[in-house]
Amino acid sequence: MIIASIDSKTATWLENRTEFNPVLEFLKTTDLTQLDVGHHKITSNISANVQEYLTKAENEGRWESHVNNIDFQYIQHGSEYIRVCSASQLKVKTDALSQKDAYYYQKYQGSTTNVLVNPGDFVILFPEDAHEACINVEKASSVRKLVIKVPVALFK
């Protein structure tokens, strides 16, 4: 997992990585307010899903992880918690790997890292990072987020 702000030295370093450069360039040069909710191509194999939603209580969240894609979650508006732990700690509830590149897990109450993400922040979640996103900070609030899928195959 990597946590940073779009204006941070970490973001600058990631721009120098060929795998993440298109993502950072897209976020920095695109007028994100003009993007419709839904899927947008960044490159032939990297895409962004613009989402707008109300955050939810922790007990309404859903744990997931991905095998073939890295999740690059960027907050454009609002704030939320993303809970993260090792996928090896969880028990698979639903295997949607072939349909959605996702494992969905049973609820987990063990030790987690709770990441507060605000506008301009991003979290990069690797295949071993199970995550439960969209969680209330204090109460339900509106969030606009881009979930960008970066294929793991780009790193091989």
Image: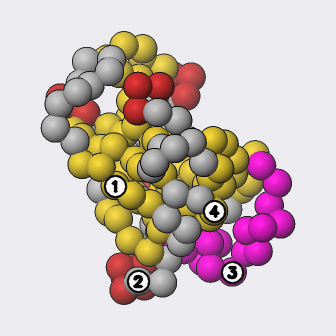
Disc on res. 115: 1
- Which tag, 4 or 2, sits closer to the chain's start? 2
Badge 3 crowding class, 10 Å Cα cut-off, few under 14, some 14 to 19, many 20 or more, is: few
Quote the CA–CA distance across marks 4 and 2.
18 Å
Quote the CA–CA distance across marks 2 and 3.
16 Å
In the image, 149 versus 143, the foreground residue is 143
Q: Is residue 109 above or below residue 94?
A: below
Q: Is residue 1 magenta?
A: no
- Which tag, 2 or 3, sits closer to the chain's start? 2
Q: Name the spot of residue 128 as percent of width and height, x first.
A: 27, 41
Q: Nearer the viewer, mark 2 or mark 3?
A: 2
SS label for mark 4: strand
Q: Quick check: marks 2 and 1 in contact, CB under 8 Å?
A: no
Q: Could you tell whether 110 is left or right of 145 in the image?
A: left
Q: Quick check: marks 4 and 2 in contact, CB under 8 Å?
A: no
> What coloring was used for the rendering?
secondary structure
Identify the residue shown where x is 37% and y is 51%: 125
SS label for mark 2: loop
**Residue 93, picture quadrant:** top left
Q: Name the spot of residue 79 as percent of width and height, x first.
A: 52, 57
Q: Is residue 37 at all visible to an observer of this figure?
A: yes
The magenta segment is 20-37
Q: Which residue has dot 2 on it?
A: 8
Identify the residue shown where x is 32% and y is 21%: 107
Q: Could you tell whether 115 is left or right of 21 in the image?
A: left
SS label for mark 1: strand
Q: Could you tell whether 16 is left or right of 49 in the image?
A: left
Q: Quick check: marks 3 and 1 in contact, CB under 8 Å?
A: no
Looking at the rendered structure, the kind of residue marked 1 is Val
